[in-house]
Image (cartoon, rainbow, N blue to C red):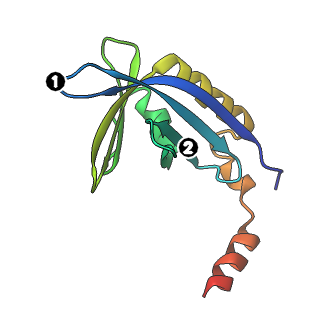
Amino acid sequence: MSTSSTVTAELGIRLVVPQQAVVPLLASFHYTTADPYAIRVSFHVGLDEPVVWIFARELLSDGMARRTGAGDVRVWPSATTGMLEIELSSPFGRAHFEAPADEVASFLDRTYRVSPVGQEGMHIDVEAALADLLGRL
C-alpha cells in the first residue's frame, strides 16, 4: 500500500454542437491512486460548478487507438484531426467533445508512471474498504 499520488491536466477542448460552431471549453483531467482505475474529468461549461464525469482509465487509454465504450461513455481517435473524440450520454442528453490527443496521451503517460497497468490494486486498502462497506450496513 502506498500513499496517494495525483496527476492533473487542464486541457482546452471543444464541444461539438450539431449545425453550429464548435464551442471551446476547459476540461480538468484528474487521476489519483486513491481511486486507481478511474479518471475524473471536470468540464467547465460556464455554470457555477463544473460538470464531472468519472470513467475508467482503461477506457480512455483504449480510445486513443480505437473506438471503444458502450453505454454512457464512448471514446475514439479522429481519423483526420489529431483529436480524441469523447461522447457522453445521460438521461439528460448527449455531449460530444474533442480533446487534443497528444495532450490526453501525455496525461495518461503520467498516470502510468504513478500507477502502471496491472499494479492499480496495490493502491487499494481492501480492509479499509470492507470496513467502510460493513459500517454502512
Q: Where is 3 relative to 28, above or below?
A: below
Question: Along the polypeptide, which appears first: circle 1 or circle 2?
Answer: 1
Q: Position of residue 50 (x, y in %)?
A: 50, 43
Quadrant (top left/top right/bottom left/bottom right) for the C terminus: bottom right
Q: Which residue lies furthest to the left in this view?
A: 19
- Write the residue at 45% across / 34% down: 62
Q: Position of residue 79 (x, y in %)?
A: 30, 16
Instruction: Specify whether 60 is left or right of 6.
Output: left
Few, some or many C-alpha atoms within 10 Å of disc 1 (few <14, some 14-19, many ≥20)?
Answer: few
- Write the residue at 71% across / 59% down: 124
SS at mark 1?
Answer: loop
Residue 85 can be seen, yes or no: yes
Residue 73 is drawn in which quadrant?
Answer: top left
Residue 77 badge: none
Nearer the camera: disc 1 or disc 2: 1
- Write the residue at 52% across / 17% down: 102
- Write the residue at 26% across / 19% down: 21
Callout 2 amino acid: Ile
Residue 64 is drawn in which quadrant?
Answer: top left
Residue at mark 1: 19
Residue 75 is drawn in which quadrant?
Answer: top left
Instruction: Specify whether 18 is left or right of 51.
Output: left
Quadrant (top left/top right/bottom left/bottom right) for the N terminus: bottom right
Residue at mark 2: 39
Q: Residue furthest bottom?
A: 137
SS at mark 2?
Answer: strand
